[in-house]
Amino acid sequence: MGAITGININNLFWLGRYVEKVFTTLNSFFKYADRFIEGGQAAYEKYLADINVPDIYENSEDFFKRYVFDLSDPNSIISNLDRALGNGIVLREEIKTPSLSYLQMAMDRFKACEGTTKIRYDMLPVRDAIYAFWGSVDSNMTNMDALRIIHLGKSVERADMYLRLGYPSEEVFTQLDNLIKHVSEFVDSDAGIVNSVTFEALKYVADSRIDLIGNRSLVLENIENLIEVNFFEAAAV
Amino acid sequence: MNYMNTPVADAKAVNELLARYGVKFGIYKNGTFNEQLFPFDAIPRIISAEDFSAMEKGLVQRVDALNLFLKDIYSDGKIIKDGIIPEVFVYISKGYLAPCAEITPPKGIYSHISGIDLVQAQDGTWYILEDNLRIPSGASYPLIARELCRMASPGAFENNRIADNRNYASLLRSTMDHVNCGGINVILTPGRYNAAYFEHSYFAEKTGAILVQNSDLFVENNILYMKDYQGGKTRVGAVYRRISDEYLDPMTFLPESLIGVPHIMDAYRAGNVAIINAPGNGVADDKGIYYFVPKMIKYYLGEEPVLKNAPTYLPFYEEDRKYVLDNLEKLVIKDVSEAGGYGVVFGRDMTKEQLSDWRRLITEQSRRFIAQEIIDFIDLDVMENDRTVLRKADLRAFVLSGEKTQVWASGLTRFSRKANSFVVNSSQGGGFKDTWVLLPE
């Protein structure tokens, strides 16, 4: 087992979460951007409610601009990318320089897109860089425990976001199955990392394929509490 | 000079790569932390094989003497008893740390990584400008720049016989391994908002050492441990610390330090961990002690110094003080307790009133200052807006002391980005170049 400091565990987990958050929110945002082409008012209010982001925007135009590019808006996509990059910078030695470079490229490209009139096209390299980041960590990282923690963060975020964004049930269940698989590795090897009560609850949700729409809040709560927050906080002290 | 055989033709690509790989340094300005790219100039400084060979001998000699000096003054103090260096330049130096007296570091090495600053005069002579024996930084920049230049401009390396500098990480690793007292190697960083954080993380990546902060370390029964995320502990045998002496251990030095490791000095004193570089080295790179290094070389090694100091005067000595006061207009004055290009003033830039004030200050606080002749060091070509301009530049050579003392065949060439300025420090806007050491024919 490779040695990992408590601070790094925290950073690795949140690196995985933030990179995935950027990727998933970008994809969902693009769907709204597509609807906007013919001039229809994209229902951004519902989108914000789904992802639990307060509606501080004046109108669709303001939402399109600030939600994507405003670094001073803590809920913007670029703010999440900034947090991903910040976690990456303090993990250079774990994730390796090539992996970090893809986050830097994503940020540089993201910033260069501000003001574009063809955001989905111009942002393609941002998504490419994120794909490359995941390929790079899988290929270059030598500390497998650290890699597993990043993927744990990614799978928590993806299951959470897919459920919030109203993805079809089968897709959400696929992500829940994936999350349970990742978490199982920690249940077996590292007692205390996983909240066993919520883990069992999520396994029940996945195994019985219960109604996700009717139980959305409960399932989200279980996902959020799955990884013992205390564990990460304590480890970072 | 024709620069087509250098990465100049591909400078844009090299700079893009430096940005992509996050080659940055941090700087605090008006209380705010900003991270910025370290401006890179694609025209390398080129050092011939013959020049480097002589420089190498001189640097090894100098660092060996400085290590012997540190060993001496923290034990017997023979050099003082023998009247070579006045006591006042040692024991009241800010860099002399009384808690380090009588501690012999593992393998007797104090300065494992020495950054020696040199300049080349117009006649080609190399002069030592400054020794940095505490936490000399900067090797990571030419290291990664070389890698990126080779990627962006391979032709430049096909056509020139250049010593490969990409062995720095393995030199560093073997230096750590040599003094390791049993356990893992770690690099202790104050954290993300340190000016040299890029370097800390890059060296951790390249050497396989674990990058830690103080909260990851603890001492138990005089042994240093790293705690892992599961609550386990791993013994640490060597700490390449990138925090200053005074913050290293709140139980020994500044009690208010929030970035140090309590009792790390106890583990060090017990011989259970190597601290790289050893605490207390500041006494040997004090600008006042610089004056005495040629004497140290003769005293400890019985050799003539290969490399020259810049002509230096100590106002502490009456004869020197008289010269300094009489010739202040043409000298550069340095405050011995300052670093990073701060505390340096040029007599030629002073008004009459300022000269008068400085004469009084130097007379009153003669131990605080040194004065040096201004070396008209050579200007190097630097690209600026697609044309070359001449700028002052120095060279930081890195000397690693492990099983043997070795000079890294490269170095950090820093240049001023302002015309006629001698200040090359990155914290004051300077840029950097790669340093090519040519292989013998």
Image (spheres, rainbow, N blue to C red):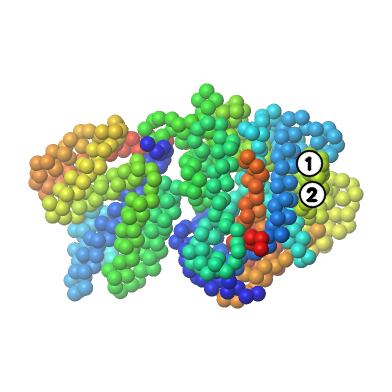
Q: Amino acid at mark 1?
A: Leu
Label 2 sits on a secondary structure element that is loop
Q: Chain of mark 1?
A: B
Tag shown at residue A119: none
Q: Which residue is mark 2?
A: B305
In this picture, residue B379 sits left or right of residue A2? right
Label 1, label 2: how far apart the Cα atoms are = 10 Å
Q: Are marks 1 and 2 on the same chain?
A: yes
Is B430 located above or below residue A96 in the figure? below
Q: Write down the quadrant of residue B112 in the picture.
A: top right
Q: Amino acid at mark 2?
A: Pro
Of the pair B411 and A215, the residue shown nearer to us: B411
Of the pair B396 and B101, the residue shown nearer to us: B396
Q: Tell me what residue is drawn at x 57 percent, y 45 percent.
A: B172
Where residue B89 appears, as percent x and y from the top left, is 78, 40
Q: Tell me what residue is drawn at x 52 percent, y 64 percent.
A: B149
Q: Is residue B44 visible?
A: yes
Where residue B307 appears, as percent x and y from the top left, is 76, 53
Of the pair A232 and B151, the residue shown nearer to us: B151
In this picture, residue B236 sits left or right of residue A81? right
Where residue B135 appears, as percent x and y from the top left, is 61, 45
Of the pair B159 and B31, the residue shown nearer to us: B159
